[in-house]
Amino acid sequence: MIRGVFNAIGVALAGLLIYIAYLSVRIEQQSFRDEARPADVILVLGAAEYRGRPSPVLRARLDHALALYHQHIAPRIMTTGGAGGDPVFTEGTVGRAYLISRGVPSEAIIVEAEGDTTVRTVTLAGEIFRRMGLRSVVVVSDGYHIYRVKEMLRARGLAVYGSPRKERNPEPLHQQWNCVKQAIGYVLWRFGVPV
């Protein structure tokens, strides 16, 4: 009896590991695919900000979104992200200020400034899209992040396309580890764990 239970647990764990490996491959494939096409809004996932200035990662995401905006991919950009420990600034408001300083009209920018996890950010952004009647979105983030965000937004009934920011000389092992972490995050999200 006990042996049967251990065998069942072993089979379940092996199945989960195979599924995570499969998802990691799908995530890595998505991470190199630029699907940018006309949509209602460009969604920029937040990243660290330093006392009101975007970190290099956030700046690269914002610059990529700005390039898409200038290509008339969408008439609006949404910046996202909460405070992340900063008592004054949020990633979303820092992103907005950066885009305005680069010539984007303030009325073309939507801000989600409360999300503290990917799930919460996407949930809040999805609700804003619903209220505004926006039905299609181009997601801008690091490549490994896009698959999970796309699936979350698709679950909300949106048409979603990914457009990863350009990375200079990504470290292959680091990239693969990020894909595994995103696969685990995706599985946890499917089970209702908000990470």
Image (cartoon, helix red, strand yellow):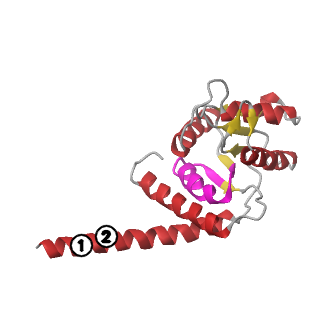
Q: Residue furthest top?
A: 88
Label 2's element? Answer: helix
Other residues around mark 2 within 10 Å, as few (<14) / some (14–19) / many (≥20) = few
Marks 1/2: CA distance? 6 Å
**What residue do we see at 48% from left, 47% from top?**
195
Horizontal arrangement in the rendering, residue 86 relative to residue 64 (left or right):
left
Report the front residue among 2 and 137: 2
Q: For the residue labelled by badge 1, is the local secondary structure a helix, a strand or a loop?
A: helix
Q: Position of residue 135 (x, y in %)?
A: 64, 45
Residue 181 position (above or below residue 110): below
Q: Residues within 10 Å of mark 1 (few under 14, many from 20)?
A: few
Please state which amino acid type lies under the numbered disc 1.
Ala
| Callout 2 amino acid | Ala
Give the labeled residue for mark 1. 8
Left or right of 6? Residue 150 is right
Name the residue rendered at 78%, 61% in the picture: 168
Q: Which residues are the magenta region?
A: 138-160
